[in-house]
Amino acid sequence: MTPSVTIVAGASDQFSITDKLGRKLALRRLTALDKLRLFKAAGPDLAQNEAWLGMAMLATSVTAIDETPIPAVTNEQQVEAVVGRLGDVGISAIADALLPPSVDDQAELVTNAGNSHGTPI
């Protein structure tokens, strides 16, 4: 795959959500290269801190807030700046949008597959 094909394919995995503050957040799923670059930005100590890295991955998934582009981060301070802009409300909305559904949610989807809302099972 050529570099341009990779970029175009990655760009198509973008979508938008609206957080509880009414901000439109443009998101994309991080690629392996994005994660590698985040590890580099975090440095050796923070790259081992799972809680910090998890929040950083959520924050770096944002490509724009209210159509204002968010540049790719290259150091710890830039990650913290994006997290600060998003706050708890933004991070929570991103987590809800990016994290896979829980086992209970998946079981409900399978149970109700093909049934209209309110149809007895």
Image (tube, grey):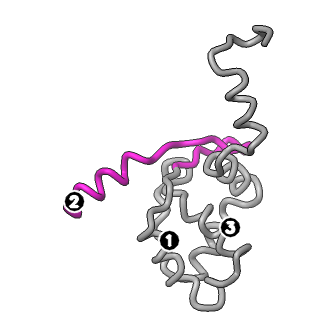
Q: Secondary structure at mark 3?
A: helix
Q: Say whether residue 14 is magenta.
A: yes
Distance from disc 3 to disc 2, alpha carbons, whole Å, reads 31 Å
In the picture of the structure, the residue carrying the numbered disc 2 is 1
In the figure, is residue 59 to the left or right of 107?
left
Can you tell which mark lies on residue 35?
A: 1
Front-most of 55 and 36? Answer: 36
Q: Nearer the viewer, mark 1 or mark 2?
A: 2
In the picture of the structure, the residue carrying the numbered disc 3 is 55
Q: Residues within 10 Å of mark 3 (few under 14, many from 20)?
A: some
Query: Amino acid under label 1?
Result: Lys
Q: Is residue 120 above or below residue 9?
A: above
Which image quadrant: the N terminus? Answer: bottom left
Q: Is residue 102 above or below residue 116?
A: below
Distance from disc 1 to disc 2, alpha carbons, whole Å, reads 20 Å
In the figure, is residue 105 to the left or right of 42?
right
Distance from disc 3 to disc 1, alpha carbons, whole Å, reads 12 Å
In the figure, is residue 46 to the left or right of 10?
right
